Image (cartoon, helix red, strand yellow):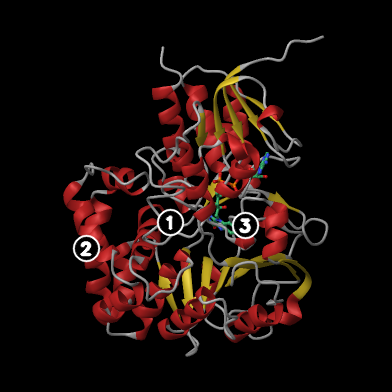
Amino acid sequence: MTAVRSYDAVVVGSGPNGFAAAICVAQAGRSVLMMEGRDTVGGGVRSEALTLPGFVHDSCAAIFPLSVASPFLGSLPLEKFGLEWLHAPYPLAHPLDNGQAVLAERSLPATARRLAGDGKAYQGLLQPFLQDWPRFAKDLLGPLPLPPGAPLTFGRFAASALWPARRLAQTLFRQPEARALFAGLAAHAMLDLNQLATSAFGIVIALTVHQVGWPLPRRGAQSLSDALTAYFTHLGGEIITGQWVRRLEDLPPARAILFDLTPRQLLQILGERLPPGYRRALQRYRYGMGVFKIDYALDGPVPWQAPECAQAAALHLGGSMEEIASSERLVSRGRIPPNPFVLVAQHTPFDPSRAPVGKHTLWAYCHVPHASPVDMTAAVEAQIERFAPGFRERVLARHVRRPAEMEAYNPNYVGGDINGGIQDLRQLYTRPALRRNPYATPLPGVYLCSSATPPGGGVHGMCGYHAAQAVLRRELRG
Ligand SMILES: Cc1cc2nc3c(=O)[nH]c(=O)nc-3n(C[C@H](O)[C@H](O)[C@H](O)COP(=O)(O)OP(=O)(O)OC[C@H]3O[C@@H](n4cnc5c(N)ncnc54)[C@H](O)[C@@H]3O)c2cc1C
């Protein structure tokens, strides 16, 4: 009989937060095992051949500013382990019905110049945070900072960030271009833009454009996870794939367990072991709207009406601020919007390795009500056609994932919610429950490290980093 090996830490789930937690503990010289249910690692950072041979599609995340801007992931030597970041000439384009597009350039002044009458207000909103980014990013990407490391900047941020995005845009900007741009950025919140604190998302997502650009990994998202794997195993970490953890007994002995999962799965795995108060808090945890995703194999590049759109890594398709706000409001109320807000990423113009010669891929998703079964293909394609007439004729194949399929693909996407839980003012810093240390559960040695902890969704790894810090401090000292 072979003895089961024990570890300092076991991490369940290999998303970016699982990797960040595992790497952080391994960097401290501790033994770490990562266990992943699927046959490949990466969580929301994977690529797959979803359509035709030779076409590489990013299964979930496609644009990675938060990885580069992250105080932890951004500090790792991933380029030495095979990762190469690529940049499109423009991080983001927001086409409008007049045939023109609002362009967000990496340079803040250059973007401000494009916004003409609203340029000064746009630059004035963002400049103070960019100047103080290294300290401010640490405050932003973690549990509620008490006291903040950059108190003046954080206070200034809170003063604007607490506003509903629609109101802030109406107050600051006079022209439809800047308003539309800000609404598209804020819509990453996946909330009604009339809700308090939705401006926070607009500001933070805009800051990433101007701080680091919107990079994409050469050969697809999977190459980020592959680089994380290579670095983690270089540090001595071990990985097991193809093993879903359903009970605590599925794990080898460890001094600490970090779950890269959301409250619903934690409840299934730990059940009655959790004290009733904490269990009830997890049962009350709220999941938000879902996504409906389409990946395309295309016969040629997208025929964007505004030529600059062909030079952008990502596009926000939703038209004016009013239209985007109304679409997000409908979705937040459980209704299907006739003109959904569509987020698009185009990789192949800047990374031809992802498709056969002369062919292209397109990545698109829209927000839909939680767990909605409605087929949004026609609505998504109508939005693309609106700004790229003739698009449909270029489609060679498409692959669709509705919320239920997103959840089947990754159980963390409950009802299609890609943020591991709704990110409104009530739940952003109190995820998964109101506790002094949100990463620790009441069970000794058991931690949560997924996007269901602060600072929430996105490929920044900071949930994993903070959870690992707590583990190193509390469980693995000495
Ligand atoms: C369509 C889509 C587009 C997105 N676009 C972007 C983007 O462009 N940029 C960006 O920054 N973010 C984006 N995101 C969000 C980002 O992918 C997530 O916020 C991020 O992946 C969360 O990381 P995580 O480590 O918390 O969890 P996940 O990445 O969800 O990883 C969890 C892992 O745990 C595994 N797992 C689950 N249950 C078990 C179990 N019981 N046993 C073993 N393993 C288990 C899963 O298979 C998965 O590998 C997108 C997400 C989606 C779905």
Percent position (x, y) of residue 148? 23, 44
Q: Are marks 1 and 2 in contact (CB under 8 Å)?
A: no
**Label 2 is placed on what type of residue?**
Ala
Q: Nearer the viewer, residue 401 or 223?
A: 401
Work out how far the residue at label 1 is from the one at label 2, CA to CA, in angstroms: 25 Å
Percent position (x, y) of residue 300? 71, 72
Number of the front mark, 1 or 3: 3
Classify mark 2: helix, strand or loop: helix
Quarter where residue 120 is shown:
bottom left
Percent position (x, y) of residue 150? 21, 45
* Disc 1: which residue: 213
Q: Residue furthest bottom?
A: 98
Q: Nearer the viewer, residue 152 or 447?
A: 447
Q: Is residue 161 left or right of residue 355?
A: left
Quarter where residue 229 is shown:
top right
Classify mark 1: helix, strand or loop: loop
Residue at the spot x=48%, y=28% of the render?
24
N-terminal of the two: label 1 or label 3? 1
Name the image quarter holding the N terminus: top right
N-terminal of the two: label 1 or label 2? 2
Work out how far the residue at label 1 is from the one at label 3, CA to CA, in angstroms: 30 Å
Residue 272 visible to the viewer: yes
Name the image quarter holding the C terminus: top left
Classify mark 3: helix, strand or loop: helix
Percent position (x, y) of residue 115? 32, 77
Residue at the spot x=34%, y=62% of the render?
200
Check the image and report above or below for 376 versus 454. Answer: below
Check the image and report above or below for 43 versus 129. Answer: above
Determine which of the numbered discs, if any, sits on residue 159 in the image. Answer: 2
Q: Residue furthest front?
A: 276
* Disc 3: which residue: 414
